[in-house]
Amino acid sequence: MAIGKVEICGVDTSTLPVITNERMRELFPLVHSGDVAAREEFIRGNLRLVLSVLQRFHHRTDNVDDLFQVGCIGLIKALDNFDVTQNVRFSTYAVPMIIGEIRRYLRDNNAIRVSRSLRDIAYKALQTRDRLQTEWGREPTVQEIAKQMELPEEDVTLALEAIQDPVSLCEPIGGEGADALTIGDQVRDDRVSADGWLQDIAIREALNRLNEREQKILHLRFFQGRTQMEVASEIGISQAQVSRLEKAALSHMRKLI
């Protein structure tokens, strides 16, 4: 996400005004009485608050213009619901509203559907991580986060992994042009090796050199999981003959391999 871009939704963020707490207190009664100009001044004066909240989502790849618009919706909701009689700064009340609106948008528009309960755990874990990092001056471990949340470590790990953005295997990670490396180049399946491929090729070649009846017996026995009695019934020979032909075919293949 281009979090450092200056122009967002056609607005030059470097020229956004800064509104004082005194001016906000003057505008509140006018806004709540329906004064459109006062409302516009109040919202425009707090757009920098939306920008500061977007910094929390710098790791996302979502379009910053979209997140900014969603954050503005959260700002407007905060303004409409703010109780001026409470001894709370507007920014203290508005920030959670803006964050909540952005998180709902991200949850509803994620390419991979994740349950709400899992997302709630993940976002609480991120909040706990930020709090502990501020208090301790270092990055807390998953075990420490889980202990603070009084949840199993496995649940926290699963939740945090669930909200990660999917990444294409074609995503470049180094190099340029034809020499560029992708994530797919670095992925390996330890269950499959070059030796395994060579062995498969050798078995296939050896199998092809058997006669048609031997190939059919081995195919039914080892690729379809049939018993010798079932193979005998299908081919029209005795089970003893199937057993003898199977052993002979396997012996022949071992020599070829």
Image: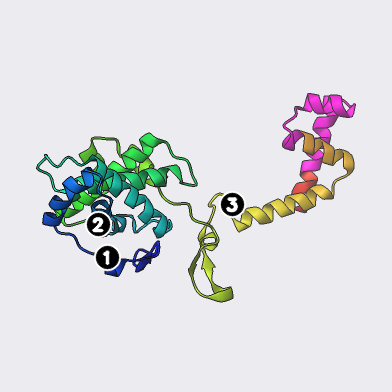
- Tell me the mark number nearer the camera, choosing from 2 and 3: 2
Chain-order first, disc 3 or disc 1? 1
**Does any portion of residue 137 appear in the rendered image?**
yes
Q: Residue 207 in the image: state x and y as whole percent.
A: 80, 47
Q: Nearer the viewer, residue 107 or 23?
A: 23
* Mark 3: amino acid: Val
- Tell me the mark number nearer the camera, choosing from 1 and 2: 2
Q: Secondary structure at mark 3?
A: loop
Answer whether residue 247 is magenta in the image.
Answer: yes
- Residue picked out by circle 1: 16
Q: Secondary structure at mark 1?
A: loop
Q: Nearer the viewer, residue 13 or 140?
A: 13
* Mark 1: amino acid: Leu
Q: Which residue lies at the image location 28% right of the left edge and 42% below the top edge?
A: 124
Q: Nearer the viewer, residue 17 or 184?
A: 17
Residue 197 horizontal side relative to residue 70, left or right: right
Question: Eyeballing the image, is 2 above or below 124?
Answer: below
Between marks 2 and 3, how big is the CA–CA gap?
63 Å
Q: Residue 72 in the image: state x and y as whole percent.
A: 33, 52
Between marks 3 and 1, how big is the CA–CA gap?
57 Å
In the rendering, which numbered label is found on residue 89? none
Question: In which quadrant is the N terminus drawn?
Answer: bottom left
* Mark 2: amino acid: Glu
Answer whether residue 234 is magenta in the image.
Answer: yes
Chain-order first, disc 1 or disc 2? 1
Q: Nearer the viewer, residue 26 or 61?
A: 26
In the rendering, which numbered label is found on residue 41? 2
What range is drawn magenta here? 221-250
